[in-house]
Amino acid sequence: MASFIILPLLGCDHIVDIPVSGDASSGSSGAAGGPSSCSPSDPCPTGYWCAYEDERCEQDASATGTCVSEECEDGVPYCGCDGNVYPSSCAAHLAGTSVTDAALCSEGTFACGDRSCKEHIEYCSRQVLLDGGYTFECRAPSATASSCEGGVVSCECLTGSPPGEPMGGASCRVDARGQVTYSWDEI
């Protein structure tokens, strides 16, 4: 049970409650009363995750980290160690998983013209030919496309022309399952 000190503020007409000790049912308490350290055997309380210096899917039993809490905003998708894609690394952590190589999130394929691309780690490159036809190719973002954080392909990380793709007449779309198709016109 948390206890509070009621402290009147000088020059103010209201009272502020300052927690003296937090709920330390999980994770070790820090000086401010909140959780500060954690380990595989001593996890953080709900709303926090354990940030290890060397993030990986399987932590050694002796590993220690720091409990972190953050307001999550969707951003660049990340692949979680559980094989699911999350809207941000924060969301993956709050779901109880670390982030990892996107290849672990590729459990299936999606259609790209007459080809099948790997889910989440490849995008469909669709070239519109001058004669009105199309060519299709499955591509993984190159190492220079470092904005594909977590290794998960998104239109945001392909913006500005993926390596090897021309800018002219380019567009990017994401289907209902989160798979990316980058279309561009033959020049």
Image (cartoon, grey):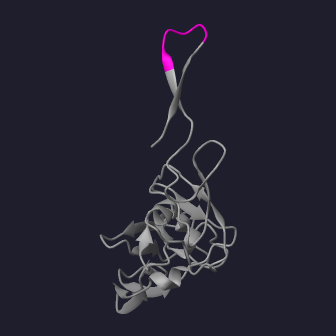
Residue at image point 69% right, 67% down: 53
Task: Tell me where residue 10 appears, x and y as whole percent.
Answer: 61, 10
Extreme-right residue of the structure: 53
- Say which of 31 and 68 sits in front: 31
The image quadrant where one finds the N terminus is: top left
Task: Tell me where residue 144 appears, x and y as whole percent.
Answer: 67, 74
- Say which of 38 and 120 sits in front: 38
Above or below, comparing residue 106 to residue 165 in the picture: below
Left or right position of 113 against 24: left
Give residue 107's quadrant in the image: bottom left
| Residue 177 within the segment the image draws in magenta | no
Left or right position of 24 against 117: right
Give residue 99's quadrant in the image: bottom right
Give residue 126's quadrant in the image: bottom left
In this view of the protein, can residue 169 be seen by the observer? no
Residue at image point 57% right, 78% down: 141
- Say which of 62 and 126 sits in front: 62
Above or below, comparing residue 5 to residue 127 in the picture: above
In this view of the protein, can residue 77 be seen by the observer? yes
Q: How many marks?
A: 0
Above or below, comparing residue 48 to residue 150 in the picture: above
The boundaries of the magenta stretch are 10-15
Magenta stretch secondary structure, dominant: loop
Residue at image point 41% right, 82% down: 119
Task: Tell me where residue 186 appears, x and y as whole percent.
Answer: 48, 77
Task: Tell me where residue 9 appears, x and y as whole percent.
Answer: 58, 15
- Say which of 85 and 153 sits in front: 85
| Residue 11 within the segment the image draws in magenta | yes
